[in-house]
């Protein structure tokens, strides 16, 4: 497993072409719908790793092997997006009449799925304080089916105490963790007692803002069977081309994350010194309320964080965002590009109401030179100050 070697080396070495003959470095893109079997016995065999295109090809298996090493997992399944990886995992456990616990910091599409798909179909969804820790056990009911965590929350950046939650749950229900921010490189939930680690590989793993894919890493075969069944019965699959793009991106993720981390911290420190900023939300800074917990469980930080501006008037914010040139406005993150978007967590929080009065702005530090990004922010703040 990759934990036995340097992670950056593992990103490069696992899932590669191992042919004894002269060969290309990467596994080729193997596209297939129909797979032919030479004999009757092969066709009827129960163990058939490649028997229909919807179940994947060697391209898929190679990427799954690499993610298994990255996350320290026994099995990895792929989904068409990070959201699909979460929703299919939840469907595997959340049946009509069951009770599902979801962190209040879960990102909006997950809440939409819970509120508008699961709940109308008889699943009771309860949102909990992301800082609950071992207290999660007090919320369990006889019909509880699973707990979903996201650490840190991708808007409000609370770090969840995954080891304490896992200990409190004591395997009574599976603990699922959205691990997109740490991406397996800076955080490994399975090593800390979580049952399932889910990554939107669209983000840092693919890394180039040109592919959609999700990964589900599991150590327990029974849990893996449940999720596999949901994926197969619903017919969700991902093309070999998308898998190839993600696997290609995985090779350079270590180098890219180092730059994202450096840029993100530099931008966070710059913003924390601006008078326009009321609060800086970056777990890697000592000022963050969960910094000690982050330092214990994470080996680094990525480029995603948030700042709360004192200003929230639309005309001022419009001037700020419209003046930016290097920061784009767009959903997602984890690509090579820097991003800045306004967000309104107060509209979705329920267990722990969001009471900050200013505007939350989420930033992603990309691979541009940090001096250019800071100049861009200087100009945007100047435009905000001049707006009527």
Image: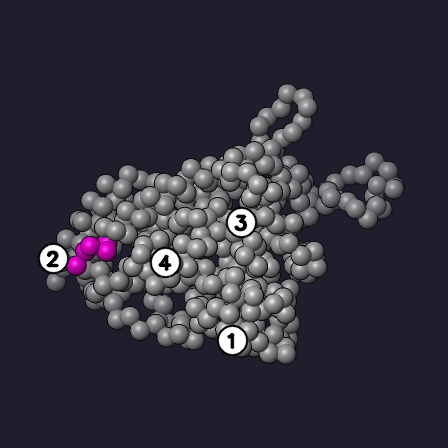
Quadrant that contains the N terminus: top right
Residue 224 horizontal side relative to residue 196, left or right: right
Q: How far apart, in angstroms, are the residues tagged by discs 4 and 3?
A: 30 Å
Which residue: 21% across, 65% down? 310
- What is the CA distance from the residue labelled 4 to the residue labelled 2? 36 Å
Residue 293: x, y in percent?
A: 41, 59
Q: Residue 30, position in %: x, y?
A: 64, 36
| Mark-to-mark CA distance, 4 and 1 | 27 Å
* Disc nearest the viewer among 4 and 2: 4
Give the left or right position of residue 147, taking residue 19 as reference.
left
Residue 317: image x %, image y %?
Answer: 22, 60
Q: Is residue 20 visible?
A: yes
Q: Quick check: is 100 in the magenta stretch?
A: no
Tag 4 secondary structure: helix
Indicate the secondary structure of the residue bearing disc 3.
Answer: loop
Position of 21 with respect to 385 (left or right) is right
Region rendered in magenta: 271-275
Q: Which residue is mark 4?
A: 291
Q: Callout 4 environment at 10 Å: few (<14), some (14 to 19), or many (20+)?
A: some
Q: Residue at x 58, y 31 (%)?
A: 26
Q: Earlier in the sequence, mark 1 or mark 2?
A: 1
Cα separation, mark 1 vs mark 2, equals: 45 Å
- Which mark is drawn over residue 213? 3
Tell me the number on the disc at residue 386. Answer: 2
Q: Of marks 4 and 1, which one's residue comes earlier in the chain?
A: 1
């Amino acid at each position: 497993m990759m934990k036995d070697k340097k992670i950056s080396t593992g990103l490069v070495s696992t899932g590669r072409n191992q042919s004894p003959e002269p060969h290309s470095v990467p596994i080729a893109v193997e596209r297939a719908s129909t797979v032919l079997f030479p004999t009757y016995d092969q066709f009827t065999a129960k163990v058939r790793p490649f028997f229909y295109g919807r179940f994947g090809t060697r391209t898929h298996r190679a990427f799954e092997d690499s993610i298994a090493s990255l996350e320290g997992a026994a099995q990895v399944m792929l989904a068409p997006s990070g959201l699909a990886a979460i929703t299919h995992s939840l469907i595997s456990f959340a049946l009509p009449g069951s009770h599902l616990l979801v962190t209040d910091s879960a990102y909006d599409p997950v809440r939409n799925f819970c509120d508008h798909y699961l709940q109308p179909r008889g699943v009771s969804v309860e949102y909990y304080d992301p800082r609950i820790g071992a207290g999660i056990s007090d919320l369990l009911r006889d019909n509880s089916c699973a707990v979903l965590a996201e650490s840190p929350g991708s808007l409000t950046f609370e770090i969840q105490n995954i080891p304490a939650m896992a200990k409190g749950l004591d395997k009574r229900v599976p603990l699922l963790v959205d691990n997109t921010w740490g991406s397996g490189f800076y955080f490994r939930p399975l090593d800390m007692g979580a049952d399932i680690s889910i990554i939107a590989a669209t983000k840092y793993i693919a890394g180039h803002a040109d592919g959609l894919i999700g990964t589900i890493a599991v150590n327990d075969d029974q849990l893996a069977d449940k999720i596999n069944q949901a994926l197969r019965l619903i017919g969700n699959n991902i093309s070999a081309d998308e898998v190839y793009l993600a696997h290609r991106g995985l090779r350079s993720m270590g180098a890219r994350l180092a730059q994202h981390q450096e840029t993100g911290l530099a931008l966070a420190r710059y913003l924390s010194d601006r008078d326009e900023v009321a609060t800086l939300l970056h777990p890697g800074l000592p000022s963050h309320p969960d910094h000690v917990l982050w330092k214990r469980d994470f080996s680094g930080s990525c480029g995603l964080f948030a700042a709360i501006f004192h200003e929230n008037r639309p005309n001022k914010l419009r001037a700020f965002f419209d003046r930016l040139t290097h920061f784009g406005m767009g959903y997602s993150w984890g690509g090579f590009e820097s991003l800045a978007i306004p967000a309104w967590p107060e509209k979705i929080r329920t267990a722990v109401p969001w009471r900050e009065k200013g505007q939350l702005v989420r930033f992603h530090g990309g691979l541009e030179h940090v001096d250019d990004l800071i100049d861009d922010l200087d100009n945007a703040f100047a435009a905000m100050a001049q707006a009527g």
